[in-house]
Structures are given as structure tokens and as C-alpha cells.
Image (spheres, coloured by chain):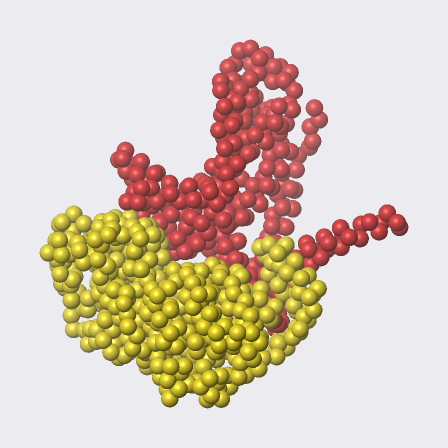
Chain colours: A yellow, B red
Amino acid sequence: MSNPDTSDLSRRRLLQGTALGVAAVPAAGFLAACATSGGDADSEDVTNSGDAENPFGVDPAAPLDVVIFDGGFGDKYATEGHQVMYNEKFPDAEIIHATEEDIAATQQPRFADGDPPDVLDDSGAGKIAIDALVNDGLLAELTPLLEAPSIDDPNLTVQETLVDGVLKPGIYNGKVYALNYAMGGWAIWYDGKLFEDQGWTAPTTWDEMMALCAEIKKAGIAPWTYAGQHPYYLWDSLYTLAARHGGRDVSVAIDNLEPKAWEHESVKLAAEALYSLQDKGYVLKGTPGINHIDSQTKFNNREAAFLPCGSWLANEQIDVAPDDFVYSAIGIPPLEGSVQPELVWSSGEEPFVVPEHAKNKPGAYEYLRIMLSKEGSKIFAEKAQSPTILKDQEITNPPAAALASLVTTAENAYRPQLADWYIDFKEQAEPALAELMAGKITPDEFIGVAQKAADSVAKSDVEKFTQEY
Amino acid sequence: MFVASFLVLPVGLYLWLVIMPFIQAFQISLTDWSGYTTGFNYIGFDNFINMWDDPKQWVIPGFTHTGIILLVLPVIVIAMALFFAFMLNVGGRSQGGVSGVRGAGFYKIVYFFPQVLATAIIAIVWAQIYKPPTTGGLLASALEAVGLPYPENGFMGSTSLVLPGIIAVMVWSSVGFYLVYFSSAMAAIPQDIYEAARIDGASRTKTFFQITLPLLWESVQTAWIYLGIIALDGFVLVFMMTPSQGGPNHSSEVIGGAIYKFAFGSGNDAGMASAIGVVLFLAVLILTVVSLRVTRRERIEF
């Protein structure tokens, strides 16, 4: 199986290309003929020798197969940056590069063939769920990389050069499987120019938010809008209101599927606060039925004052927003009595993984180590206009800097995981979140649905993950 | 023997490319294959049992909505197509020769228009039409303008209107084809039968039910089967038009979408996808046999 002859391979490819729909599933399963469970390709374990130059023992002539997601960050940072750096170090290595928009559709057959790429940027709407890959034993652990000496300072390990806590979203049961490379998070955006013209100041508490919303509404502008068709844009508002009020433990309990975690007082207050936005008429009409592009357009047109969205927003809108638009971010204003009012949902995003059966694993680790050098990080900031998870970088991009400034200390950064970990939870609770925001169900009903969904995941035989801080 | 040897290649290809994948769907439905590993374990009929727990709420809503479309779509499309075809071919003025209403040729072309559009384009156009008034949705804005009740969040944002909305688009895009199909079948009915009926003083309605429909029965039966196949699909429209590709709140999930989500989407369970495919296959098989039996009529020669 480790070396399928070419005719076998092309036959398989032919099958996969021809048989569509349901038929495609069995087609890829043709491998059953040549592989049984556990009979996977040989995979060498990569170890870190501690050598600062070539800690993983990369074969300088081995080709490196890189797949980059074609999204907001583009692929220039890889093709004109990291890959050039890799080739400078190993001039004989051929780099096989692909830029893909739909990662799952293009990479699934490669995984099923036992021929995955060496480095995979598993991102976007068509990303492959990392937990599923971890469950199937298809991803390599990144510990050797994190323990290897950093390129810039051999006295430090790679992990020591990263911002504290940023690896969290890539950790599955205590081990890092995904390197979430770009620094990102969620915030409530507003237009600094509009606020200045109108004499409004960004609210610092939820009560101020409500008072300001009344004022904004009087001025003929809708206070809030959001991507109603994509309810996952709303998780940050709910989680952060709750976790700011009751402390990070509220979110940890939820992620760990503890009984009655959703029925916590802070979650109730958070759900009630979000519900009141629609209830008081503070949400732009029709918002529950619009998508992210519509909501962003309304926001750019200054038809709505606040928009909850991720850190990528400002960059994405540079060419679209009016020239005098001042993209400004706040964390969702905390409820009265909040114990951790500065908590911000922030962590690494854009997961890079190394498949367990990659042909050039040492090269893949080295590629990631190059990405995590100062030079590699600088190139990413220039080409993709986003900070990386590397410590002490100079952030020149204003919105990114604004977001970075929201996180004051490592204790104030957190990253809820529940909806990412358990698709069963997401499919049940996310529609309920949308209905809560649309005013179709009450906060109590929402909490009921979320608790029931969490309980059913806890009871099911799905592999469980734990959140640790 | 020599002649039969020519068949080896096409039959072999057919077996390899068509029959094998079908058989493999059955095989994979008995495994826990995620779709990513090179191997898998056999788990018996677990997928067929676990399917109905449906924690992701794809399967049961999917079967329900596909069932609704399967019942509603062929009836509406065939009724409308027959009515229009009758009017365009036979329903003209009641004196003189048998002909359609005035401008029949023009109407035929107009009705056929949607058929030449790719489904993806139809989905994009209708998604715009169905949007909330805030973002310029044509239909809701029009209803608002004339003071009728309208969905504030658009048709695709409403749990009760999303499925009827999808069905309406399916009807809109298929009526034209069946109109033309029935028209040509009607053209094959001898004129003198109609003339005789007219001399006897039969009304339009009576002519339709006593003459046109019985003589078209075989065409209707064929249309029914084709429309059943279209109804089982619905997947492209749902994926392109509805929020969360089956939402809001799973109120437009279709079975094709559920299979896709398990096989290639966030479900990561090719075994389950195949199991649903097998259930669907059996359901379609039974439905086809039953409907062919039920609609069987004596053939009328003319």
C-alpha cells in the first residue's frame, strides 16, 4: 500500500472523477481492496535533535507538497514568502504547491488514497474538521516542532516565541495537532467617523450600550446588524457576555459539557441581553434573513452602527468601505457585575496541519518552523496583512493593532470551542441562537435547547475533548 | 463469439463505472469509514439504526422534506403543464378549427425560458427575489408596497416559507419543459376526435377530462417519474439559496443534502452517507414499482 503502482492510482482517480454523488463515496472506498484498517502507509516519527540548523533531519532533496487555502489571506505569503525561504535553505527540494478553495473536496481523495500533502492549510468553508482527522489518527502531533529551537534565537524553543495561549484551538486532548498561524479573534465593530460626527462614544458597559442604542435609533440609524444567515457570527457575543460576567470558568464548564453549564446565571443574563436587542427594535429590519455580505454592506453604508464580526473584517472591507470609514473595535460591553470585564475571544486562526502519512514530514515541520521565524511572520504580515501568533511583532495594520490592544493579558484571552468540537451540538444549538437573536424564541427556550444539545453530546459515544486553562 | 467479444469493453466499463460504485455503496454503508482513512471497520447495520437518532437533524427533516416535495411537485407541475398545454393547443375559441389561445407560440417560448437556464443561475436569481425588503428583495418589497403581509426576513429567512419557496422555484423551472412535452403529445391526438366532441357540444373542461387526459396518460405517467427524480434532488437549490444550506433551523434540509453533508461536508461519515443512500435507493425502488402499478391503465390505440 505504501507504494501504489501508477496504473492502480489512475484507475482509482478515474473512478472518483466519473462517479458522482453517492456513487463517489464508494468509489474512493475502492481502497478497501488494498488496505484494511490499521494497514496504513508507513509513517516515520519525526524527532527533534535540538540542532538549530536542521533539527528534524530534513532530506535536502526531498520534495515538499504544500496546499494553501485560497481565502482572505491569499497565497502570496506562501509562494512568494515561506516557500522561497524553504528553497533558500534547501535549493534541491522541489516544492509542489497547490492553492485550493475547497479543501475537503480536493484533499479528501488524497487522504483516502494515503497520499496526503505534507503541509495543509485546512481553512475556509470547505475545511476538513480537524477533530475528525485527529479521531482517525490522520494528523501528526506538532510537539517536535514546538520543542525545536527557534530560527531566530536557538536558545528559545519555537513554543517560547509564541504568544501565550494561542495554540489552544489546535489542542486536542492535551496535544497540539494544528498550528493556528494568524492571530485573530472576535469583536464588535463600529465606525469611528460616524461616532465622532454624531458625538457618540463607544459604550463600556451593557447599560451604556442600551442607552446609546436608543440614541442611535432616534438618529434614524439601526443600532445593530449581523449576518443572520450565519448564526456562528453570534457565538462570540453570547459567550463573551456570559464569560465576562461570570468569569472564564463559565465558558470552560460549557466546553467541558458539564451538566447544567448552560443554565448558569451568567449565560441567562447574556441570552437575555442579546434578546433585548431585537425586543427593543435595535436590530436593522430583516437582519435575521441576510448574509454576511449584506450585513457588511449595510454597515459600510452606515445604515447600522454595530456589527459583530471577526478580526479579518477591516482588511476584507478596505476596498469596499467609504474612504473616511474608521474601522474600530470593542469587546462586547460587559453586563453589570462582570467579574472579568476585559475577556476577549482571541487566539490563533488559520490552522496548518501535518498529515500523519505525509511523505516528507521532516520537511513539513521545517516549513512550519520557517513560518514561525521573525522573517516568515513579517512576510505574512505584509502579504496577508494580519499579525501572526509570534510574540513581540510590530503590528503596522491599524485594525489588527486595535484588536491586539483589546487583549491586555494572557488571562484575558479565551477561546470557546464547543461549536467547533461537536458538530452534533452546533447543528442543534446554532439555529436556536439565530432564533433567539431574531426574537423568535425566548432566552429560556434557547438555554433549554442548548443544554439539551450539550447533554445529548455528553451522552453520545462521540469522542470528547476537554478545555484546560 | 467474435461479435460478443466487441461487447466486453463497453459491458466491462459499465460494470466497473456504474454497477461497482452501487455495490460499493452497499458495502460502505456497513462500515464506519469516515471518508479520509485508507481502511475501515465493518460495524454491521449500526448506520441504519443510528441514522434515526439524528443528532445533527439532517436525516429525519431531510426525508420529511424530500417526501413533501415528492408528493407536491409532480402534482402541481403536471396540473399546470397540462392546463397550459391544453389552452395553448386546444383551448382556443370554440368556433371553427381546433387551435390554441391567441399568441400560443409566444407563450410556449416564454414558458420554456427557465429550461435553458442553468440551475445555478436560477438559484442566484431567485435568492435575490426572495431576499428581505431591506436588502432589495423583489417579492417581499412588492408585497410590502401593496400593503400585503410579507416576511420581514425574506422568504429564505422564514422557517415556514423556505420550503414552499424552494418548491415554487422547482415548479417555475420545470413547468415549461412539461408544457412543451405535453403539447407535442397533444399534437399527436387526431383533430377529428376533438371536432367530433365539439360537434356533440362538449365543453372545454369536458373535452379535457374525457379526451385529452386519457389519451395523454402514458405521457403523464412518464412525466410523473421524471418529476419524481427531480423532486428527489432539489439539492442544488437548497444548497445555493437557503441559509446554512438547509436552514433556517433545518426547515429545508433535503435528503441529497444530508448525504452530501455526511460524505463531503462537516459530517465526516462516508459510512452514514452511504447508508442514507441505500435507504433512499430502496425507497425510490419501492415508490417506482408502486406508482407504475397504481397508474397502470389500458393502452388506447389511435
Look at the image and tell me in which quarter the C terminus of chain A lies: bottom left
Residue B194 seen anywhere in this rendered image of the structure: yes
Of residues B60 and B275, the one drawn nearer to the viewer in this rendering: B275
View extreme (right): residue? B1
View extreme (left): residue? A199
Image point (62%, 50%), residue name = B286
Res. A345 image quadrant = bottom left
Residue A440 seen anywhere in this rendered image of the structure: no
Image point (60%, 18%), residue name = B194
Task: Work out whether B89 lies above or below A16.
Answer: above
Q: Report whether A193 appears left or right of B48.
A: left
Of residues B145 and B220, the one drawn nearer to the viewer in this rendering: B145
View extreme (top): residue? B96
Image point (35%, 71%), residue name = A378
- Residue A79 place in picture, x, y as percent: 46, 65
Q: How many marks?
A: 0
Q: Report whether A381 appears left or right of A354.
A: left
Look at the image and tell me in which quarter the N terminus of chain A lies: bottom right
Q: Report whether A344 appears left or right of A355.
A: left
Image point (31%, 36%), residue name = B142
- Residue A62 place in picture, x, y as percent: 57, 75
Of residues B235 and A294, the one drawn nearer to the viewer in this rendering: A294
- Residue A280 place in picture, x, y as percent: 19, 54
Res. B123 image quadrant = top left
- Residue A362 place in picture, x, y as percent: 52, 79
